[in-house]
Amino acid sequence: MYPGTHAATSPDKPAVVMGGSGEVLTYGELETGSVRLANHLRDAGLERGDVVALVSDNTPRVYEVYWAAQRSGLYITVVNHHLSAPEAAYIVRDCGAKALIVSAGVAGLAAAIEDHVDAGVRLAFGGEIPGASSYADYDTALADASSEPPADQPRGADMLYSSGITGRPKGVLPTLPERQVDEPGDTYVALFGPRYGFGTDTVYLNPAPLYHAAPLRFTATVQALGGTVVVMERFDAEKALALIERHAVTHSQWVPTMFVRMLKLPADVRTRYDVSSMRVAIHAAAPCPVEVKQAMIDWWGPVLYEYYAATEAIGITFIGPDEWAERPGSVGRAGLGVIRICDDEGTELPTGEVGTVYFERETRPFEYHNDPGQTLAAQHPEHENWTTTGDLGRVDADGYLYLTDRRAFTIVSGGVNVYPQEVENALALHPSVLDVAVIGVPDDEMGEAVKAVVQTPEGVEAGPELERELIDFVRERIAHFKAPSSVDFTDFLPRTPTGKLVKRELRDRYL
């Protein structure tokens, strides 16, 4: 399945509805736009395996570009528009983009990278790019392109950038499929479609940026299966609830920080909106504190479904609400690949012991573009088809995975490992905590000490009394040696728009 199937039967059905502006892109329009762009790129000389880079805010045009690449055997690299100009230019150069397509919604970044990348095709949509001279107008360029689908439409793929094990972003390069765009075989359609009940009646709310892997891939999966995607321009807790009610949303996907923001809305605001249409609320991207997830289930009912995966697609685990009720904190059992937990030397560990999480697949599913060293670092020392992204966890006797943290963030205090995620989970729902990060800081006696960095809600007085209260709050919930020895207060914690904490940036402040 792909959108062209639904354009033929339901051309006027919305493929995309923008949550703020209300702009609609129908399946007929999506088909025509993606075909014209595919033909334009082909006429410009792009061939199977070439890369299209896209720098855009959340807009329906993202899907025209995505499906044009997917029906042309091209890779698409969607660039985080919150990056600095040097960072964005590095990705566009590194991916080897033959085409660069930008949105006027991020005109400043588009202009700043113009002279620092080498791409033969440069298009801009949504308006002019002040200060830039090389971008052709998207609509004008496509006006002369054919609206007839070419006979040969090899399936493309995304090449998105990930931090991987550590360090500078790396392109996750999958192998291009050996099939046409309308032939079966898409992993997301096959795995997630039946599991979550995606279909033509699906109304899927996406509150996250489309340059991120899960929002892009899941919304494209919903379009492949004929549903409607409601896209928020940016996340806002109350607006998300209003959109669920307005569009009778049936499916959605979140990260835990979004749950926390919604739970901390005043009670009269939370109860103001009807969310009973929601059949499946998916969450992923970071471990969800047990108390947070339970509070969401108490509010929305048993509709929370979790998966654990990565941009690298090394493997996937799934867990539904009934399973989770029996195993709070688990991210589920393997649905793709076999879980292997190993120590630092690569020796597989017994059930229940914490180690690096590897997934075994028949073959390694990816490589890091232009970075064979990091590709090798992601592999098990003895098994090329066992790969990891550096997460730590344990597996119980029934094969359920429990994540602990990322290896790079483990705190070694007095020779004992402390996993920051566990401490952050303990603090997440304290009423005086709006956001929290836990890091290790140098300590003469212990080697490293546990420090919590807390952002408080407006009106909450931060100081020694609250610091003592928060430390005691943690000590009531987990082992005393894991509790912070100190708490700092801040007005801001560095998070990506997808909700992931940029812990390296925070640690650099102290180190």
Image (cartoon, rainbow, N blue to C red):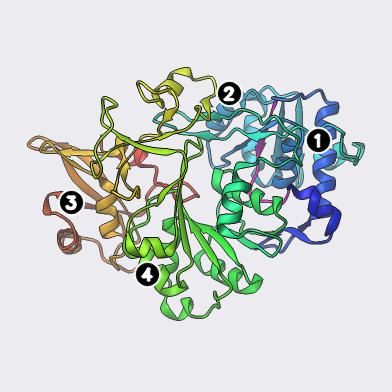
- Mark 3 highlights which residue? 484
Which element type, helix, strand or loop, lies under badge 1?
helix
Circle 3/circle 1 CB separation < 8 Å: no
- Label whose residue precedes the other's in the sequence (3 or 1): 1
Circle 1: residue type: Ala
Query: Marks 2 and 3, Cα distance to the nearest angstrom?
Result: 41 Å
- Number of residues whose C-alpha sits closer than 10 Å to that of mark 1, classed few (under 14), some (14–19) or many (20 or more): many
Circle 3: residue type: Pro
- Say which residue appears at 92% left-offset and 37% top-offset: 144
Q: Is residue 83 above or below residue 16?
A: above
- Label whose residue precedes the other's in the sequence (2 or 3): 2
- Number of residues whose C-alpha sits closer than 10 Å to that of mark 4, classed few (under 14), some (14–19) or many (20 or more): some
Can you see residue 112? yes
Chain part drawn in magenta = 50-61
- Mark 2 highlights which residue? 94
- Say which residue appears at 26% left-offset and 66% top-offset: 461
Query: Marks 1 and 2, Cα distance to the nearest angstrom?
Result: 23 Å
Circle 4: residue type: Ala
Closest to the camera, between mark 3 and mark 4, is 4
Circle 2/circle 3 CB separation < 8 Å: no
- Mark 4 highlights which residue? 295
- Say which residue appears at 30% left-offset and 68% top-offset: 431
Query: Marks 2 and 4, Cα distance to the nearest angstrom?
Result: 43 Å
Q: Is residue 140 left or right of residue 132?
A: right
Q: Quadrant of residue 44?
A: top right
Which element type, helix, strand or loop, lies under badge 3?
loop
Q: Is residue 24 left or right of residue 378?
A: right
